Image (spheres, rainbow, N blue to C red):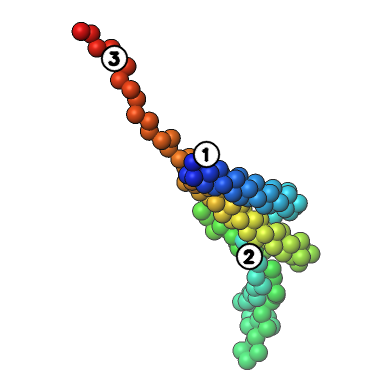
Amino acid sequence: MVDKSAMLYIIADMNTTQSVTALERKIEKIRQALSALGPIHPGSASLQYQVCGRPGCRCAHPRRPQRHGPYHKLSYVHQGKPVCRFVRADCAKELLKRLAAFKRFRRLVDQWVELSIQRGHIEFFGPRPPTPPTVPVANTKERRT
C-alpha cells in the first residue's frame, strides 16, 4: 500500500516539474525576443525651441516671438550622470526606434526576472519530500549475563 503523503508528494513533484518546464519555455521566448531587438538606447526624446537672444531676430520680437526649432533633444542617465544631447533631424527617426527597443528590452528583462523569481520559489520553497516514517529500532546491544 502506498503512503498517502508520499502519493501527494509525487503529484506535487509532477506539478512542480511541469510548472518549471512551462516557466523555462516562457524564459526561452524572452531570450529569443531579446536577441531580435537590435540597437537600443536609453532615455527619452523631446522637441526643444530656442531663443538666440540676438537683437532684431524673430525670436526676440516683442509681441510675436518665434523661437528657433524644433530641435530634437535626447535625455538619459548613464552611470548615475544625466546626459542631454541634441540630435540631428535626419537621425531622429532612428533614435526613436532605438528608444522604443530599449523600452521593450526593459519590459522583457522585467518579465524574465519575474519568471526567474517564480521558478526560484518553486525550486527553493516548494513542497518538500515527506519525511520517512520513523520505525522503532530494536536494541542491538546484547545483554551479557
State the residue lying farthest toward the left: 145
Q: Identify the element where label 1 is drawn.
A: loop
Nearest the viewer among 138 and 96 is 138
The image quadrant that residue 137 belongs to is top left
The residue singled out by tag 2 in the image is 44
Residue at (65, 85) in percent of width and height: 65
Front residue of this view, candidates 44 and 13: 13
For residue 94, which quarter of the picture? Answer: bottom right
Vertical position of residue 63 compared to residue 133: above or below: below
Closest to the observer, 117 or 72: 117
> Which residue has dot 3 on it?
141
Identify residue type, mark 1. Met
* In this view, the mark in front (3 or 2): 3
Q: Which mark is residue 1?
A: 1
Give the alpha-carbon distance from disc 1 to disc 3, as whole Å.
Answer: 32 Å
Q: Is residue 3 left or right of residue 83?
A: left
Name the spot of residue 126 as percent of width and height, x first: 49, 47
Viewer-side label of 2, 1:
1
Q: Position of residue 89 (x, y in %)?
A: 76, 67
Q: Position of residue 85 (x, y in %)?
A: 64, 61
Farthest residue in the top direction? 145
Q: Residue, x 59% and y 52% (percent of image)? A: 115
Pick the quarter of the image with the C terminus.
top left
Q: Earlier in the sequence, mark 1 or mark 3?
A: 1
